[in-house]
Image (spheres, rainbow, N blue to C red):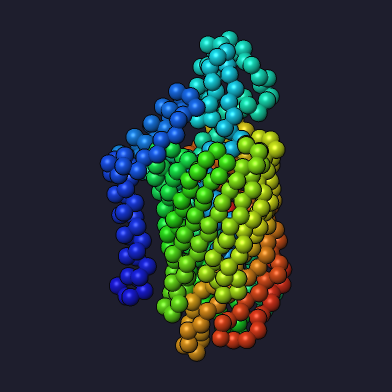
Amino acid sequence: MNLLTRWIAFPLLIVLINTAAVCAQGSFLEELRIQRQPQSIWEKEELQGFSNSTSVPHDAGEAESSLSDDRLDAAALEPDPQSDKSCVLNGLPEDSLIGDAMLDDAAAVAGFETSCAPDFDCCETPLIRYRTTCFQGAQTAYGIIPASDSNGLGIKTFDLLGTFAVPFGSMDHVISFTPFFRMDQLNANPSLDVPDALYETGVKTFWKKVQNERLTTIVLFTPSVRSDFQSTAQAFKLFGMALLQWKLVPDKLSMSGGAIYTGRQDFPVLPTMGLYWTPSQLWKLDIQFPSPRLSRRLLKDGDKSETWAYLSGVFGGNTWAVKRAGGQDDQLTLRDLRLVLGVEYLLRENRGVFVETGWVFDRAMEYENTPGQIDFGDAIMLRAGIQF
């Protein structure tokens, strides 16, 4: 086992072992547990089931590291803000954590007499994304950007990741760990002097805590190795994000602000700010720099599945440590902007599939030790993935 392999494998192994140990130690969770008063007896039973299953082991964010690329991100661990509402079925509360079976039973007892019309948002049964185990699911994805001409740059991307989460009493306070691996295969003219493939592997650590009814703090920290697996000089990179989220109108409108440390050569630090607006159960508008996104729900099957279409902007690219053809170490930066149109089919417990296509423009590459940059023509991207 060479030095680079040890550098990559050992930290990942340590994190996975520690994560499994945390999931298995009920005493650790009891010491750090922060309880939130459930809104109903059904939510209390659901949270208790989550805590118990977390304490006992089960058998269970193309040359881009996009700032909005993680379909299986920790946002899926929290309920949809729109689903926090509840309606009353003849005195029985329909809480945000119950499913179709509970709603059907309540309706049967009540004789289908409700205090709100069936078409109203408050009577919708939410899709529960998180699982009642430490393991929250895995995702694999494949994407392609063909070269625009013989002097262009073609990219094929493969992603694989898995998420483990530990809630401290409720989903209002959660930490998650996501080991991941990414490979970008490059197809370019030899005169460009780029490696055949670029790699990134590391562990994303996400922490979220609801401080009060309006304020939420979010921190994302990702140590990783980004290189061609030939160069080790400056291959260790850090990505970090700190964010404050303030609810302006509960369940409808919130604003956020913070900063992102990208670990890139071209844009090492970026501000992040914007508004998140959910005017109804059908629409979500995330006006967030640097990755805005507009989503429209197309179909819904109770609490079993949802189908969404989305239009998003992506600030793509990254920086890798590489070894040039002459043997010298260097830093390669690829950069682009993307307009992406996609469809995702979401199932319970972080399962689903997605397909997307888009227009990739403002493409460029540059080396740290070589002045100037090389521009490429626009291209079309295709990408698909599955969460399981």
Left or right: residue 129 versus residue 379 is left
Looking at the rendering, in which quadrant would you find the N terminus?
A: bottom left
- Point out residue 264 in the picture as x, y percentages from the top left corner: 55, 71
In terms of image quadrants, where is residue 259?
bottom right
- Residue found at x 62% / y 12%: 113
- Residue found at x 43% / y 50%: 176
| Nearest to the observer: residue 175 or residue 379 | 175
- Point out residue 318 in the picture as x, y percentages from the top left corner: 56, 69
Vertical position of residue 374 compared to residue 285: above or below: below
Left or right: residue 22 versus residue 178 is left
Vertical position of residue 111 compared to residue 214: above or below: above
- Residue found at x 58% / y 68%: 269
- Point out residue 309 in the picture as x, y percentages from the top left corner: 67, 45
Vertical position of residue 35 compared to residue 1: above or below: above
- Residue found at x 45% / y 23%: 41
Is residue 380 visible from the viewing direction of this image? no
Left or right: residue 226 versus residue 245 is left
Vertical position of residue 290 compared to residue 252: above or below: below
Residue placed farthest to the bottom in the image?
326
- Point out residue 156 in the picture as x, y percentages from the top left corner: 57, 65
